[in-house]
Image (spheres, grey):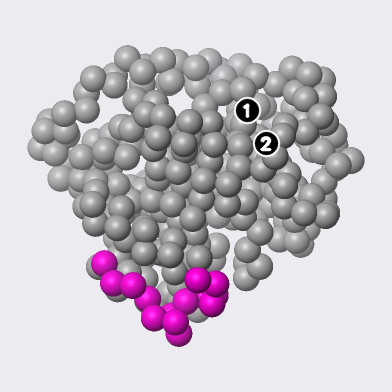
Amino acid sequence: MADDKMQLQRWELKYVIPEELALAVREFVRSYLELDEYGAKRDDLSYTIHNLYLDSSQLAIYWGTINGNKNRYKLRLRFYEDNPSAPVYFEIKRRMNEAILKQRGGVKRAAVEAVLAGHLPGPSEMVSGDGRQLVAIQRFVELMMHDRAMPIAHVRYDREAWISPTDNSVRVTMDRNVYISPEFVARFSEQMDDPYCVFGRLVILELKFTGRFPDWFKEMVRIFNLRQGSASKYADGIARKGELAFYPGGAEALMGGGFGGASERKAERMARLDNLLSKAA
C-alpha cells in the first residue's frame, strides 16, 4: 500500500445495508468508478484493513462519539499485513461539523514504539519524504499526549473500494466482516483475542466526495432508497461488545468514568442497529 490515495478533506455519507443490496449497488457504481488496485487483485474484490485505536483510560474519545460531539476526532494506527517490514500509518480522523478531515503519516514499524512514547521519527524512519506526513505525526503525538491515549481496541474489516479513474474527488467503499477486540498493546498482529462481529452480515456503504454531491450519487440514493445513518466501527463495536472489556483499569475505571450521561444516546444508537440486524437475519 505504498501509493497513498487517501482523500485528506471530504464529505462522507454512511449507509448500513444488507449484502443483497450491496451487490446491486456494486453493479451501479462500476458504471462510474473502477475497482482500486488492491481489491482488483482479489477474488472477493476486497482487502483487509487493521486499525489499532487509541483512547484515554476513561474512553473519552469513544464517549465523544456516543454523545455526538460536533468537533471530534479518533486516533488510530493502521496496518495492512502481519509483516515486520510493512509500514504503520498514524492517522487522525477529525469531524468538523459535516466535513471529515484526515491527517496521516507512515513510519517504518521499528519506529512505532518510540512514536507512541512521544518521540518524533527521523527522516530515515518515515515512509515518505512528504513533509505533511511528519506534520501529521507531530499532531498525532500532541493529541495522544494531551489525552493520555493508549492502545484500546483492534478493529479489522474487509474493504471493497471503488475510485475515480481520473482523480481522487469521488470514492465509494463497502466494508464487510467488521470485528473488534480489546487490545492494550501495539503488537500489530492479525490475530484478535475474543473478537466480536459488530455489524453481522450488514455492509457499511460509504459515499465520499471532496466537492459537491455528484448527481449520480443522488440517483443511486433514489434508486436504491438508501437511508443515511451513523456507523462507527470503533464506537459501535465497543458499545455492542460492552465498555467494560475496553477499560484498561477494569470495573474500577468504569465506575470513575463520569461519562454515564450518554446512556440515552447510546440506547437509541444501539436500537437502530439492532433493528437493521434483525431485518438482515
Q: Quick one: label 2 or label 1, which is nearer the N terminus?
A: 1
Residue count near mark 1 (Cα–Cα under 10 Å), binned few <14, some 14–19, many ≥20: some
Report the front residue among 169 and 231. 169
Q: Is 125 situated above or below 24? A: below
Main SS, magenta region, reads: loop
Q: Which amino acid does label 1 sit on?
A: Tyr
Q: Where is residue 226 in the image (x, y as percent from the top left)?
A: 70, 21
Task: Return the mark for residue 15.
Answer: 1
Identify the residue position indicated by label 2 in the image.
Answer: 207
For residue 213, which quarter of the picture?
A: top right
Question: Residue 221 location, x and y as percent?
Answer: 75, 23
Q: Give the range drawn in magenta.
A: 118-131
Residues tagged 2 and 1 counted as in contact (Cβ below 8 A): yes
Residue closest to the eye, 2 or 45: 2
Residue drawn at point x = 15 percent, y = 45 percent: 249
The residue type indicated by label 2 comes to Leu
